[in-house]
Amino acid sequence: MPEHGGWFFDSVTLSNFALAGGLQVLIGRYRGRGFVATQVVDELTRGVAAGYAPLGDGLDLVDKGLLRMVSLDRDERTTFRQLVAHLGEGEAGTIAAAHRRHGVVVTDDLATRRTCADMRIPVTGTIGILQAAVLDRKLTLSAANDLLHIMIEAGFHSPVNSLT
């Protein structure tokens, strides 16, 4: 894999892991190398306020420095303004930061993935993370499938029902 500036998470993927109680997987794989844009923190905060308390665990990762929050610089804000016309603020902030910093976008949102493809930004998502955790022996295949099933029950629109 080419050298890159880290993994930039949007609220969709963080929510999948938070709502399923699987944030430890992210800590194990991305501690110190994972980032969230301030716009994602704002989205998670609104989610907690709307009654999705487990999203607070995702915010705790930021508060503890396990995922690092980044503010957009001037050039990134220019990109953000272009993207926010057709994407949510969290997704636009994530792409803007990852693009300028040569990172990988972590998302399950189809429109975000398409935008990343157009901009030639590498992408992964929930399924990719679970597969990588199995390959790295951080999770057994059975444990990864159990986590995936919990995510699906919590509302994740997974493209697969199990990992192989």
Image (cartoon, grey):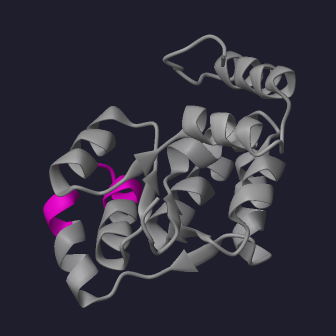
Q: Nearer the viewer, residue 25 or 93?
A: 25
How far across and down, in percent of the image, does residue 100 sit? 30, 77
Whether residue 111 is visible:
yes
Position of residue 89 in the picture relative to residue 65 (left or right): left
| Residue found 32% across the figure and 41% down from its top | 113
How far across and down, in percent of the image, does residue 107 sit? 46, 45
How far across and down, in percent of the image, does residue 140 sit? 85, 30
Image position of 157 with respect to 110: above or below: above
In the picture, which quadrant includes the C terminus? top right
Picture quarter containing residue 127?
top right
| Residue found 56% across the figure and 43% down from its top | 13
Image position of 37 with respect to 136: above or below: below
Q: Which residues are magenta?
A: 81-92
Position of residue 121 in the picture relative to residue 51 (left or right): left
| Residue found 35% across the figure and 58% down from its top | 89
How far across and down, in percent of the image, does residue 32 sit? 69, 75
User: For the view shown, which residue lies furthest in the top direction?
Assistant: 161
Position of residue 62 in the picture relative to residue 118 (left or right): right
Q: Nearer the viewer, residue 36 or 53?
A: 36
Image position of 149 with respect to 32: above or below: above
User: For the view shown, which residue lies furthest in the front direction?
Assistant: 1
Look at the image and say whether residue 54 sits in the magenta stretch: no
Q: Nearer the viewer, residue 158 or 38?
A: 158
